[in-house]
Amino acid sequence: MAILDVRNLSVDYLTDEGSALHAVEGVSFSLEQGSSLGLVGESGCGKTTAMLGVLRLLPAEGRIISGEVRCEEVDLLQLSEREMRQYRWTRMAIVFQGAMNALNPVRRVGDQIAEAIMLHGAGTDKKAAGKRVGELLEMVGMTAEMARQYPHQCSGGMRQRAMIAMALACSPDILIADEPTTALDVMIQAQILDLLQHLQKELELAIILVTHDLGVVAEICDDVLVMYGGKTAEYASVDVIYNDPLHPYTQRLMQAFPDIDNPTSSLVSIPGYPPPLDALPAGCRFEPRCHCKSDICAVESPPLMAVRPGHYVACHQARG
Ligand SMILES: Nc1ncnc2c1ncn2[C@@H]1O[C@H](COP(=O)(O)OP(=O)(O)OP(=O)(O)O)[C@@H](O)[C@H]1O
Ligand SMILES: [Mg+2]
C-alpha cells in the first residue's frame, strides 16, 4: 500500500494585485514505503511549491486550490493545523532547498539539532535531546563530537549531513530532500547520495528527491516525475524514463545529459525558457519550445494519459 498518495494537487500564489498564479496544477503521484521518487524539471517548474504544498508549509501567499494528500487513509489537507503537526516531521520531513546555508552561524550545530528535537518531539528534555543528537549525527556519517562545531567549521557536505540529521530527528517514514546536492562538488554530491541510499535501506525510508539533475535521479530513484510549467509532463519508472521517454520535454532533458555509453554524442540544449506563470500558453505549456508539435498543441492542453500501465504522459503526439 502507498505510504503517500498525492492526487491532483494544485497550488496558486496570490499576487498583491489580487490575481492567482497557477504554480502547480493537478500533480499526482504515490510513494511506497522504502521507495524513492525523483521530482525533476527546470528551475521554476513548481517542484518546491508542490513539496511545500504536500507538507502544508507554503508561504502566506500560497494557496492549495485542490487535491488530496493521503498518508495511509488520512487526507492531510483536511486536518486542522494541530492535527497536521502529528504528521509533519514525525511522519514526513523535509530538507529545505538551500537549508545547509541557513544554519545559524553563531550557534553550535548540535544545539540547533537539539532545538529541533525538543520543538517537534514533545516532552523530550535537554539531556535526551543531546543523546539523540549524537545518534543522529552518527546515523548520517558524522561523529557525536561534531555536535560542538559551529557551522563555519563544517564543510558544505557536513552541513548538508547535519540538515539531513535534523530532518530525521523524529524518525519520519518519508523524507523530502529538495536539491540536496546542488552547490556541492561532485565527490561530496556522490557521498550525500550514498548517504540517502543508505538511510533509505537502513530506515526503510521513502524518499522524494527534488532535483534538476537527471544523473542524480538515475543513481537512486525508483520512479521519476517530470514537471514542466507546474504540470506533470511524464511519470514512470526510472527505467522507462531513461530508455523510452515519450514526452518531447523528457526526451530533450535526456539529450541534455551526458550519456556514458555514447560519450561522443553531442549535448542538446532546449531553446527558450519555461513559460512565465502570468502568461501561460493556452495549449500545451511546452508547445512554444517543442520540436514535434502539431496544430492542436497550441490550442488544447494535453491531458495526462496512461500510455501503458505505470507510464503517464501529457502529450498529444504520444497519445496518438
Ligand atoms: N512566494 C511566491 N510568490 C509568488 N510566486 C512564487 C513564490 N514562490 C515561487 N513562486 C513562483 O512559482 C513558480 C514555481 O516555483 P518553485 O520554487 O516551486 O520552482 P522550482 O521548480 O522549485 O524551481 P528551482 O529549481 O529554481 O528551485 C515559479 O514561477 C516561482 O517564481
Ligand atoms: Mg525549488
Image: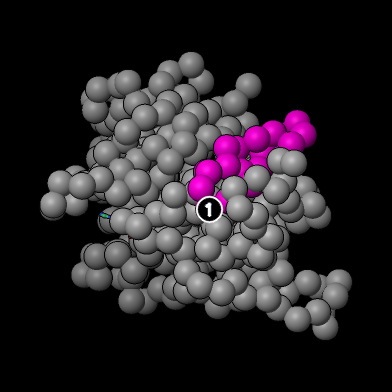
Q: Report if residue 38 is visible in the image.
A: no
Foreground pick, 236 / 54: 236
Q: Is residue 213 above or below residue 196?
A: below
For the view shown, which residue lies furthest in the right direction? 261
Residue, disc 1: 298
Q: Is residue 257 above or below residue 83?
A: below
Q: Position of residue 179 (x, y in %)?
A: 48, 60
Foreground pick, 290 / 216: 290
For the view shown, which residue lies furthest in the front direction? 295
Residue under the point 53% across and 28% down:
5
- For residue 75, side relative to residue 32 (left or right): left
Quadrant location, the N terminus: top right
Q: Report if residue 288 is visible in the image.
A: yes
- Does the magenta-highlighted stretch encompass residue 310? yes
- Does the magenta-highlighted stretch encompass residue 233? no
Foreground pick, 247 / 150: 247
Q: Position of residue 143 (x, y in %)?
A: 49, 61
Q: Position of residue 171 (x, y in %)?
A: 46, 37
Q: Is residue 84 above or below residue 56?
A: above
| Residue type, label 1 | Ala
Query: Which span of residues is magenta-colored?
Result: 297-315
Q: Is residue 148 above or below residue 139?
A: below
Q: Position of residue 283 (x, y in %)?
A: 50, 49
Determine which quarter of the picture holds residue 93. Answer: top left
**Crowd tier of the residue under label 1, counting other residues whose Cα lies within 10 Å: few below 14, some 14–19, many 20 or above:** some
Element at badge 1? helix
Q: What colour scheme governs how the chains and residues are painted in the rendered image of this protein? A: one colour
Residue under the point 79% across and 52% down:
244
Residue under the point 41% across and 28% down:
67
